[in-house]
Every structure is written in structure tokens, then in C-alpha cells.
Amino acid sequence: MWTGALLWKSVACLANAARCGRTHCYFTGPFFLLMAVGTVLHSLQILDLGTNGWSWLGLMIVGGTGILWVFTEKVWGKFLHPKGKPENLLSS
């Protein structure tokens, strides 16, 4: 279930980044994809995270999402502007 949910979130974020340019989506989309890969590797016991592996993955997902969301939007603002479009055209 984790892998499916993370893949869904990744696709949703990447689509949202392309559609409206929300800053954190450019970072959280690939991050969720990476975490989906991590869940698959851990479930297949290729990536050994110990007896608390699912807890570590959960903390990384929640913590990483929060950090990426807050940090990227504080640094670059809420929206990244599409290439070649002035800021004032986006508000109309």
C-alpha cells in the first residue's frame, strides 16, 4: 500500500508542478518516487533498514515532505514561474 500511495502522490505532484508551477511539487514529486523505490527495496529485503525499517521510512517520508515543502517555498516562493513568462501574465 505504501508504494502505491507514494507513486500516486508522486504523479499528482509532478502533474501539479507542470500544471500550475507550485514550487514544492517540483521537489516532492521526485522525492515520493524515491521513497516508493525505498519501500519496494525494503519490502523485498534488498534494503535492510533493521527491525524498525517501516518506522524509519515513515519518518523519512513525513519529515522529508515537510522540509521540502517549507524550505523550497521559503527560498523560491509559492510558485515557480514558467520559463519565458513574465510574472504579471500569470496573475491574469
Image (cartoon, rainbow, N blue to C red):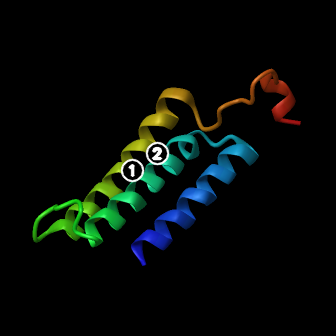
Which residue occupies 69% across, 40% down? 21
Count numbered badges in the picture.
2
Which residue occupies 46% across, 45% down? 69
x, y (%) of residue 19? 75, 47
| Residue sitting farthest toward the bottom | 1
Q: Secondary structure at mark 2?
A: helix
Q: In this figure, which residue is indicated by the disc labeled 1? A: 66
Q: Nearer the viewer, residue 56 or 90?
A: 56
- Left or right: residue 34 compared with residue 86: left
x, y (%) of residue 87? 78, 25
* Relative to 78, residue 76 above or below: above
- Left or right: residue 35 compared with residue 90: left
Q: Quadrant of residue 23?
A: top right
Q: In this figure, which residue is indicated by the disc labeled 2? A: 69
Which residue occupies 62% across, 50% down? 14
Which residue occupies 57% across, 46% down? 25
Q: Secondary structure at mark 1?
A: helix
CB under 8 Å between discs 1 and 2: yes
| Distance from Cα at disc 1 to Cα at disc 2 | 5 Å
The disc labelled 2 sits on which kind of residue?
Trp
